[in-house]
Amino acid sequence: MLKILLINSIIIFIGAYLLEGVSIKSFWTAIGVAILLGLINMFIKPLILLITLPLTILTLGLFILVINAGILLLIDKLVDGFEIKGFWWAVIFSIFISIANTVMFWIF
């Protein structure tokens, strides 16, 4: 669990460094974002996916990108020191996090 949190924090911190539309204050803020993202993905996202299942099927799964971007924008509002400068930056950041997580968990 701690390894997952650390990997996600590093991915979030690097993503904020690489993408100009995403900014983060410190690595401690990245840890807070990773914790909140994990909690939302564990408890709230399954409910959202269930509610939006017809739309997700209709869009062949692409609506999940919108859900992920919305979750990141929600975290932007909840965490001081973390900022995303718009919906499309949230989509790009969401894709970055997903790809980086896949690669990192494949390596480790």
Image: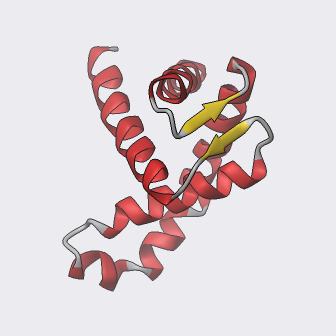
Display colour scheme = secondary structure
Residue for point 72% across, 33% down: 32
71 horizontally vs 78: left or right: left
Residue for point 51% across, 72% down: 48
Picture coordinates of residue 65 (x, y %)? 36, 59
Residue for point 23% across, 76% down: 59
Quadrant of the rendered structure where residue 106 is? top left
Which quarter of the figure is the N terminus placed in? top right
Picture coordinates of residue 80 (x, y %)? 80, 40
Q: Which residue lies furthest to the right in this view?
A: 80
Instruction: Check the image and report above or below for 62 versus 54.
Output: above
Residue nearest the viewer, comparing 28 with 26: 26
27 horizontally vs 101: left or right: right
Residue nearest the viewer, comparing 76 with 57: 76
Which quarter of the figure is the C terminus placed in? top left
Residue nearest the viewer, comparing 7 with 69: 69
98 horizontally vs 10: left or right: left
Instruction: Check the image and report above or below for 92 versus 77.
Output: above
Picture coordinates of residue 49 (x, y %)? 43, 70
